[in-house]
Amino acid sequence: SLENKRPSDAQILAQARARSKSRGRLSMTTTDDFKFGTTLGEGSYSTVQKATHVITGQPYAIKILEKSHLIRNNKMHTAIAERNALAALGAGHPGIVRLHSTFQDEWRLYFVLDFARNGEMKTILNKIGSLSLPCARYYAAQLVDTIDYMHSKGVIHRDLKPENLLLDDSYRTKICDFGTGKVLETGVDRAQTWVGTAQYIAPELLEAKETSKSSDFWALGCIIYQFIAGRFAFQGLSDFLTWQKIKKLEYTFPEGFDNEAKDLIQKLLVREPTERLGVGSPGSENDIDALKGHSFFKPISWDKLWVDPPPPLE
Ligand code: ATP
């Protein structure tokens, strides 16, 4: 009879487990599968805790989001956006904090992420001020390569900044916090929401409230500037005054700033989004290959970028 042909719940579960195992993912995860450790960070809507998988001993960072808090603040969509962006990015690139699995209980959502042992780039910058030129070049190149991958998957980050660049065991960088991330529908290039952090916001966001891939390249310019100068490219006494400076493209380079880096930053911090280096369609003079081929990146071997050890952080 039909009844006999229908697989039992136990069989369905076993199949599901086998399927997720063959995909290399944790299956049917609950908090019991982990031993929770120290708090790694606290965001406005989440806590990130170190956790060790009980069976494999593998360390993870688990982002925990309180459902009631999300609902109360009408932020459920950002949690979903983050999960969707991370899922679209998958395991395809070493420069992105990978989402291994998600699960929930009655009160919370849990995102099981790669553990980035060496914390935020921001902490390093706070400690040492600025990066040496080889370091700035190396981390800028990793960022370019990761942004290229991210955009190829239709994801824009929209809040790139040193707080969201984490460092793994080998001091390679991983982008995290896709809470402001956006997965573009095929054929669509722009998104309509206003997000980001004052110092890194692109001028078009301040005016048209429209983001596109090119806003990530603006932030890249701000970040490379900060790596080398040890201060923000745009900084006023208030967010409002910072934004005035951004709109007027009012920034200066400190004396002795590397000329190649200066040229690169000037080609990223361009008011017209479509004219920024890296954003052009393939084959155009400002496409991603032109960015990777910029003279600042001459010493970089792009094919060994994620294999070669980083220059010492000093
Ligand atoms: P915010 O409100 O600032 O945007 P958030 O709630 O979106 O924060 P995240 O930025 O994702 O949270 O994480 C908060 C902090 O936790 C990070 O800045 C970082 O210090 C730490 N953290 C996040 N993910 C990881 C990870 N995978 N490995 C190690 N530390 C992490």
Image: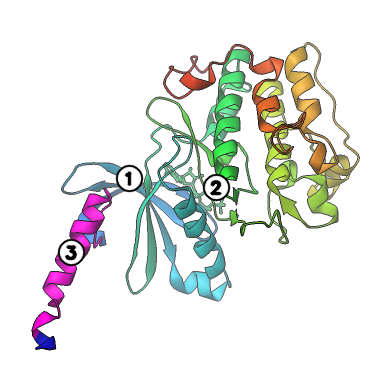
Decide if residue 98 is in sight here. yes
Q: Identify the main secondary structure in magenta.
A: helix
Residue visible at 54% across and 39% down in the picture: 149
Q: Secondary structure at mark 1?
A: strand
Whether 271 is among the magenta residues is: no
Q: Which residue has dot 3 on it?
A: 15
Q: Which residue has dot 2 on it?
A: 153
The quarter in which the N terminus is drawn is: bottom left
Disc 1 crowd rating (10 Å Cα; few below 14, some 14-19, many 20+) is many
Q: Using residue 258 as the reference point, say whether residue 161 is left or right of it.
A: left
The residue carrying mark 1 has its beta carbon less than 8 Å from ligand 1: yes
Residue visible at 25% across and 62% down in the picture: 30
Q: Nearer the viewer, residue 66 or 262?
A: 262
Whether 8 is among the magenta residues is: yes
Circle 1/circle 2 CB separation < 8 Å: no
User: Cα distance, mark 2 to mark 3?
Assistant: 30 Å
Residue flagged by tag 1: what amino acid is it? Tyr
Q: Nearer the viewer, residue 100 or 231?
A: 100
In the figure, 262 relative to 53: above or below? above
The residue carrying mark 3 has its beta carbon less than 8 Å from ligand 1: no
Residue flagged by tag 3: what amino acid is it? Gln
| Span colored in magenta | 4-29
Q: Which residue has dot 1 on it?
A: 60
Mark 1 or mark 3, whichever is nearer to me: 3
